[in-house]
Amino acid sequence: MRGRISVVALLEKYGWERLKHPPYSPDLSPPDFDLFPKLKEPLRGIRFPNLDILNEEVSRRIRDLNKDGVLCGIQALPKRWQSCIDKQGDYIEGL
């Protein structure tokens, strides 16, 4: 069995450049703070008899969201970004 080599060691071994990525924050991800709650809330507590019916209901809900528009979530992004900056990356509760 081969010994474990860290990813950083492999990057250095092959001379590959290490790219810096910002940390992931669900507070900055529109699907996490806007879309998924809008999809989940109306379905909360409902038991679906099978996967096909669940898929149909989720698809219907997505169509309804598209019809209503998700512009509110998009327009809220700058405020969300600023809150994340103000909190220095800490979790944003209920914004």
Image (cartoon, rainbow, N blue to C red):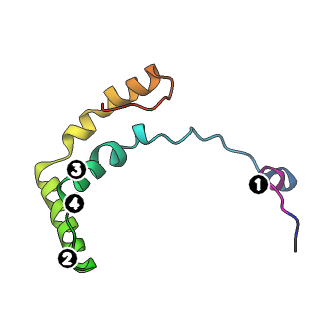
**Proximity of marks 2 and 1: CB atoms separated by less than 8 Å:** no
Left or right placement of residue 24 versus residue 64 in this view:
right
Mark 2–mark 1 Cα distance, whole angstroms, equals 43 Å
Q: Which is more toward the observer, 32 or 50?
A: 50
Which residue in the structure is indicated by mark 1? 7
Mark 2–mark 3 Cα distance, whole angstroms, equals 19 Å
Please tell me which of labels 2 and 3 falls first in the chain: 3
Q: Which residues are magenta?
A: 4-10
Nearest to viewer (mark 3 / mark 1): 3
Type of the residue with mark 2: Ile
Which residue in the structure is indicated by mark 4? 45
Type of the residue with mark 1: Val
Q: Which is more toward the observer, 10 or 91?
A: 91
Q: Who's the residue at 56% across and 39% down the image? A: 23
Look at the image and say whether residue 40 sits in the magenta stretch: no
Type of the residue with mark 4: Gly
Task: Please identify the quadrant where the N terminus is shown.
Answer: bottom right
Which disc, if any, is residue 68? none
Which residue in the structure is indicated by mark 2? 53
* Secondary structure at numbered mark 3: helix
Please tell me which of labels 3 and 4 falls first in the chain: 3
Type of the residue with mark 3: Lys
* Secondary structure at numbered mark 1: helix
Q: Residues within 10 Å of mark 4 (few under 14, many from 20)?
A: few
Left or right placement of residue 82 versus residue 52 in this view:
right
Q: Which is more toward the observer, 95 or 43?
A: 43
Look at the image and say whether residue 8 sits in the magenta stretch: yes
Q: Who's the residue at 17% across and 61% down the image? A: 61
Mark 3–mark 1 Cα distance, whole angstroms, equals 38 Å
Which residue in the structure is indicated by mark 3? 38
